[in-house]
Image (cartoon, grey):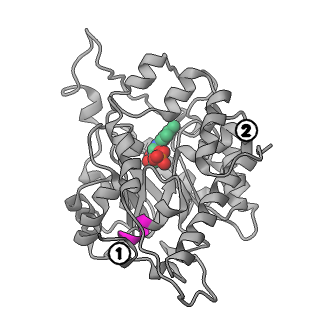
Amino acid sequence: QIPPSVAAVADYEPLARERMSAPAWAWLQGGAADEITLRENRAAFERLRLAPRVLAELAGGHTRLTLLGQALDHPLLVAPMASHGLAHPDGELATVLAAAAMRTPVVVSTQAGTPLETLAQAAGDAAPPVPLWFQLYLQPDRGFTRALVQRAEAAGYRALVLTVDAPVSGARNTEQRAGFVPPPGLGAVNLQGARPLPPHTARPGQPPLFGSPLLDAAPTWRDIAWLREQTVLPIVLKGVLAPADAVRAADEGLAGVIVSNHGGRVLDTVPATLDALPAIAQAVQGRLPLLLDGGVRRGTDVFKALALGASAVLVGRPVLHGLAAAGAPGVAHVLHLLRTELEMAMALCGCRTLADIDASRLWRG
Ligand code: FNR
């Protein structure tokens, strides 16, 4: 049930918190270390002002776009997140069904708590079907990685999102303090049978990071060429903040880049994604589409990201807030709110289509 007092995406946050245990909430909501980047992702959106335009021709307006050759109704996707079951017993299945109803692609996490095939089946039942993308963490066992990619292809996933900003996990102090441990039974089912990653939390007596098997197995640009040979799917690189890395992604023939700092969860004090975006857009010169995530909570945020060069955005935590608070209807409502607010912002800034959203719609004092 969606409480009538929910008027905006942020209203789901306190409702979700009430329904989740303190450790699970710390896992969902927390960022790395002092959470400076986590806050900065929001602050960057809040700093920008819009430049409205009046009396523009809006008849026939829409939010459609083509991304990686896929026709989408609007520039929103659900960001990959592990273990939706920590937010709600219906887990990823509810998220995928709700997103399909809202015509929103979901990027399914490698660490999802539901088999990737089950989710593909659910999304495929939507008419017309809504694309699912598969988020990949390269596993130290490349044979296992290849098999995982083949499963995603066979199940009908339409793109691979390779997350590269977390070869080691960050200082997850908030989780640590709350005593978060992944509950048994919510494991990463897609990784069953994989050689586990060695643990690497900095604790007295454990070896330091360098020299550990973890860093020795960390992916490099060489693995990108390898991955391209394994799949016909377009590959999108997730977790880029440096223009040079985005240019390299284009040089390597990748299909897109997600400007992301992992929702402020890995390395603290890196910049807000919105602040990193303009230089990346400038450097890649439209050679590949840019997506952005981190702190998107309003339709005006989507609008601002597009104005600075993104083709689409991904939404993370708010989806799990909606899920925790109200199950699948909560997820659908979150996506509906964002889409409605985006259309409001477009209409009031005189933008008939996404192509009209550019830097001229941002206020330069
Ligand atoms: C994530 N994120 C993430 N990214 C990824 O590539 N694979 C994953 O398994 C996860 N897991 C995950 C769990 C949780 C609880 C969160 C909050 C995030 C990062 C995610 O895809 C995205 O980059 C950020 O969440 C975007 O920021 P917002 O929208 O949460 O502010």
Residue 307 is one of the magenta-drawn residues: yes
Image spot of residue 43 (x, y percent): 37, 49
Q: Is the magenta stretch mostly helix, strand or loop?
A: helix
| Residue at image coords 40%, 52% | 162
Question: Could you tell whether 264 is left or right of 299 in the image?
Answer: left
Which residue in the structure is indicated by mark 1? Answer: 359
Disc number lying in front (1 or 2): 1
| Residue at image coords 69%, 35% | 88
Question: Could you tell whether 123 is left or right of 183 in the image?
Answer: right
Q: Is mark 1 on a helix, strand or loop?
A: helix
| Residue at image coords 50%, 34% | 29
Residue 5 is one of the magenta-drawn residues: no
Image spot of residue 119 (x, y percent): 67, 50
Please tell me how crowded label 2 is: few (under 14), some (14-19), or many (20+) other residues with Cα within 10 Å. Answer: some
Image: 138 above or below 251: above
Q: Can residue 353 be seen in this view?
A: yes
Question: Could you tell whether 11 is left or right of 210 in the image?
Answer: right
| Residue at image coords 60%, 84% | 61
Which residue in the structure is indicated by mark 2? Answer: 90
Disc 1 marks a residue whose amino acid type is: Ala
Q: What element carries label 2?
A: loop
Disc 2 marks a residue whose amino acid type is: Asp
The residue at label 2 has a CB less than 8 Å from ligand 1: no
Q: In which quarter of the image is the N terminus?
A: top right
Image: 71 above or below 82: below
Per the rendered image, the range of residues in magenta is 304-308
